[in-house]
Image (tube, rainbow, N blue to C red):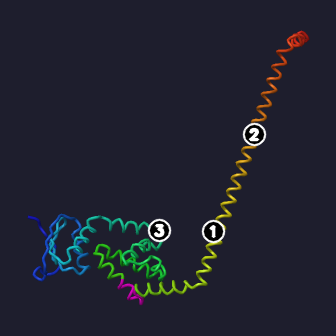
């Protein structure tokens, strides 16, 4: 019979809609901690290699999400990635993931102070093994404690957009875009002209080389013809040699 030296959670009798699970794992303690942080009613008996779990069936999806996360090994990989960063902002590599959980553009979070960004990322890591709702709740709590909820931040971003969306601003943007496009066109034309000049120079050099070869060949043929047509002269030339 398997020995379960550890017991955690609430009294089984207080759990409604009971669901049961029993499986082998060496990470039972991580599952128990995540369930507790997620405020899910559960009772667990576990050891070093197995866990017997009773929980409220209304939280079935959340429990399954937690077990899948713990079993994946992704959390350990996440911690290694943070530790491998050489600077003090290792946690900030997770800011885009935090933005995804909060369903907001990452630019909205980057507009906040760096210490708040880092606090959000550290909270995300602390609750990573929990279900998604719990992570969102804790991140929202960090934003609220620091005086600005996510909705406030998004409203501020919207007001900034409206302030910069006046006819004058749009005209300036259009002029800047047109100037940029003309610059791109000019650069492309300069590149094309340089390419044509290089191609012409290469062709001219090749033509001169061909002409020189042709003339040399003609001169050689002329000399050979003269030699054949004047055998007596060649004979005289040989007799004059010592």
First in sequence, mark 1 or 3: give its number.
Answer: 3
* Number of numbered markers: 3
Residue position for label 2: 207
Who's the residue at 68% across and 57% down the image?
191
Instruction: Find the distance from the CA under tag 1 to the CA under tag 3.
Output: 40 Å
* Horizontal and vertical percent position of residue 49: 18, 64
Q: Within 10 Å of the Cα at label 2, are there few (<14), some (14-19), or many (20+) other Cα atoms?
A: few
Q: The N terminus is located in which quarter?
A: bottom left
Whether residue 142 appears in magenta in the rendering, the answer is yes
User: Most prominent secondary structure in the magenta stretch?
Assistant: helix
Residue position for label 1: 181
Q: Which mark is residue 90?
A: none
Relative side of 42 to 73, left or right: left
- Which label sits in the foreground, 2 or 3? 2
Considering the numbered disc 3 on the image, is that residue within a helix, a strand or a loop? loop
Instruction: Find the distance from the CA under tag 2 to the CA under tag 3.
Output: 60 Å
Decide: marks 1, 2 in contact (CB < 8 A)? no
Who's the residue at 15% across and 69% down the image?
21
Q: Which residues are magenta?
A: 140-149
- Which label sits in the foreground, 1 or 3? 1
Who's the residue at 46% across and 74% down the image?
89
First in sequence, mark 2 or 3: give its number.
Answer: 3
Q: Within 10 Å of the Cα at label 3, are there few (<14), some (14-19), or many (20+) other Cα atoms?
A: few
Q: Is 214 placed above or below 138 here? A: above
Q: Quadrant of residue 67?
A: bottom left
Q: Which mark is residue 86?
A: 3
Relative side of 138 to 95, left or right: left
Who's the residue at 49% across and 81% down the image?
111
Instruction: Find the distance from the CA under tag 1 to the CA under tag 2.
Output: 39 Å
């Amino acid at each position: 019979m398997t020995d379960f030296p550890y017991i955690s959670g609430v009294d089984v009798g207080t759990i409604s809609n009971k669901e049961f699970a029993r499986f082998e794992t060496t990470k039972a303690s991580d599952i128990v901690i995540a369930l507790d942080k997620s405020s899910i009613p559960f009772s667990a008996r576990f050891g070093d290699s197995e866990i017997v779990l009773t929980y409220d069936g209304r939280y079935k999806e959340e429990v399954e999400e937690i077990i899948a996360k713990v079993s994946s090994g992704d959390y350990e990989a996440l911690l290694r990635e943070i530790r491998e960063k050489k600077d003090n902002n290792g946690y900030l590599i997770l800011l885009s993931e935090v933005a995804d959980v909060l369903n907001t553009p990452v630019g909205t979070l980057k507009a906040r102070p760096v210490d708040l960004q880092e606090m959000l990322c550290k909270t995300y890591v602390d609750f990573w093994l929990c279900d998604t709702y719990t992570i969102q709740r804790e991140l929202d709590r960090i934003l609220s404690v620091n005086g600005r909820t996510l909705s406030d931040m998004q409203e501020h971003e919207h007001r900034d957009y409206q302030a910069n969306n006046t006819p004058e601003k749009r005209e300036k943007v259009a002029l800047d875009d047109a100037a940029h496009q003309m610059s791109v066109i000019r650069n492309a034309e300069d590149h094309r002209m340089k390419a044509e000049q290089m191609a012409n120079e290469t062709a001219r050099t090749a033509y001169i080389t061909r002409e020189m070869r042709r003339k040399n060949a003609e001169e050689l043929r002329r000399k050979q013809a003269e030699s054949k047509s004047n055998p007596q002269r060649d004979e005289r030339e040989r007799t004059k040699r010592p």
